[in-house]
Image (cartoon, rainbow, N blue to C red):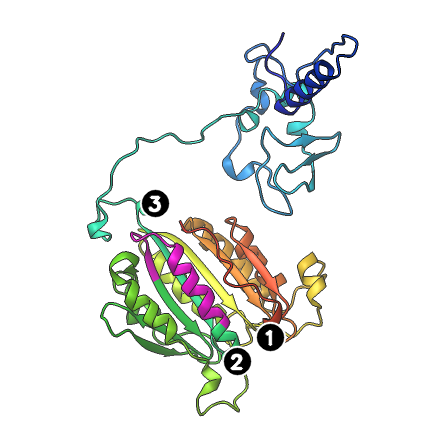
Amino acid sequence: MRQDFHPFLSLICSICLVHLVLKRSCSGGCALIPLAPASGSVPRPSAVDEILAEEIPRCQQCFGYINAYCMFEKKAWICSLCGSKNDLSSRYATSAVRAGLQELQRGIVDVVEECVEVDVSDIFSKELKPQERPAVVAVVDVSGSEDFVEVVKSGILALLEAIPPYVLFGLVTVSDSIGVYDMRSSFPHCLRIPVPEDGELDVAIADVLPPDCFLVQMGSNKQTITAAVESISAAGSDEHRTAPRRFALGSCLDSLFEMFEEDLQFSLRVINVIGSRPNYGLGALEEQAHTASSLTKGTAKNLPKGSEFYSSLVDRITSMSAVVDLFVIAEEGYVGVDAMIPMVECAGGTMIYYPGIDTSALPQVPAAP
């Protein structure tokens, strides 16, 4: 009997045979036709053999890659992770062609490297590769209420428990100014950079704290990092409580990415937790009348003015091989999720939307690098 049939068919066959034996019914049998030819029986189609990693189709819903465990219809493929249907390109038109494609083979390892021990006692050593120097930066919206900030703080504190000790960590807060945390000593303090109305910072984040000062290693600085997170407070809690809410996310991301673009030494992940629409500085978005349901379904028809800024970040993010996550706890109507989605999707980041503080389920954080 051919042994290369689908594992689900094997399971069904076993169940049927056991049922027949237990019931002592009449003898029966079945014929299994393999879903794919035996290995090596069909030549690989050279015309469609080669493909770049970024060209491999991804699910429109969960961004999972097409793979050998997906189901195929005449004009669509069904994601093996979330079950969503996606358009089928000509490369995957027939089963005969699919049988020879590398990305649809089971058990394929994309990159095989020797497993080597890395001494991370000096995490900033020039001998380390970027992938051996993972860095997580939390960007927190502090332009809103204290209730929002308290929820965010609990989520970040949970994140700290999941981050391995060798990972580097940085903390930034944003309102109408950018707060850059210096966590090198046992008493962390926040250095503030005012954001002018045009969004162009007079002083860059790298000028205040370069990467090797801004980022600290989790293992040896966890208490200091925890203290820094616990010290975060809402900008509206001080004497400027009556001032209009201002959130300069775009200016913050622009300066933050600029710092890491200058020296590509880190495997960077930026976790943004926001509660309001960026309405100040670079990337300020106009107010839009969208509901929470329309945002979660991605049905916004017209992107607001200012959304082109976040689309322009896509090339910068991919050139750094960085990942951007976006957690939204909407405090004030339209937040601008539809405008910011491209910078999340481009590298497979996480986007989670909560329509309000009461519905949020933080801590809910992505896996540590």
* Predominant SS of the magenta segment: helix
Q: Which labelled disc corresponds to residue 131?
A: 3
Residue pictured at 60% horizontal, 38% vertical: 57
The amino acid at mark 3 is: Gln
Q: Is residue 312 left or right of residue 269?
A: right
Q: Quadrant of the N terminus?
A: top right
How many residues crowd mark 2 within 10 Å: few (<14), some (14–19), many (20+)?
A: some
Q: Identify the secondary structure beneath mark 2.
A: loop
* Res 81 quadrant in image: top right
| Circle nearer the viewer, 2 or 3 | 2
Which segment is the magenta one? Answer: 151-169
Q: Earlier in the sequence, mark 2 or mark 3?
A: 3
Q: Identify the secondary structure beneath mark 1.
A: loop
Residue pictured at 37% horizontal, 54% vertical: 163
Disc 2 target residue:
145
Percent position (x, y) of residue 344?
A: 53, 55
The amino acid at mark 2 is: Ser
Estimate the spatial distance between the alpha carbons at disc 2 and disc 3, rounded to whole Å. 37 Å
- Residue 347 in magenta? no
Disc 1 target residue:
331
Q: Is residue 163 left or right of residue 21?
A: left
